[in-house]
Amino acid sequence: MADNTDKKVDESWKEKAKIAPQAEQKQEKNDLPEADFKFFLTTLGMQAWIALGMVPNPINNKTEENINQAKFIIDTLEVLQQKTKGNLDKDEAELLEHLLYDLRLAFVDKTMKKG
């Protein structure tokens, strides 16, 4: 029978195997931006810019114009502004105000050119 006293077994792989799935989950969570109000506003704003034909659709990289959809999103942002008035921090309120201002100007410009 062979003497096993000289052999060293590396058991660290067990710990690495336990940690790997946790690290993958943490990485997946980090791939997503943190959900907050400013990110939500920016997302709606981007949808409006796409609907106005000012930004290409990131899915197909084509410029598509849908004035009705743009108006709906702008109206939705206006409702959010009214319903959250006095409940936003300074940065959030300014972002919403500037976003609405820019989108309204672009909307009027687009509709005046068509009319």
Image: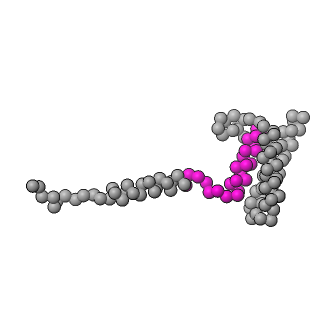
Image quadrant in which you'd find residue 71 = top right
Q: Nearer the viewer, residue 83 or 36?
A: 83
- Snapshot colouring: one colour
Q: Mostly what secondary structure, the magenta segment?
A: helix
Q: Nearer the viewer, residue 43 or 110?
A: 43
Q: Position of residue 112 (x, y in %)?
A: 89, 38
Q: Position of residue 53 (x, y in %)?
A: 76, 38
Answer left or right for 111 relative to 43: right
The residue depicted at 80 percent of the width and 65 percent of the height is 86
The residue depicted at 32 percent of the width and 59 percent of the height is 12
Answer left or right for 52 relative to 21: right
Split into 4 quadrants, where in the image is the C terminus? top right
Answer left or right for 7 relative to 72: left
Query: Which region shows up in magenta?
Result: 30-54
Residue 37 highlighted magenta (yes or no): yes
The residue depicted at 74 percent of the width and 65 percent of the height is 89
Residue 9 highlighted magenta (yes or no): no
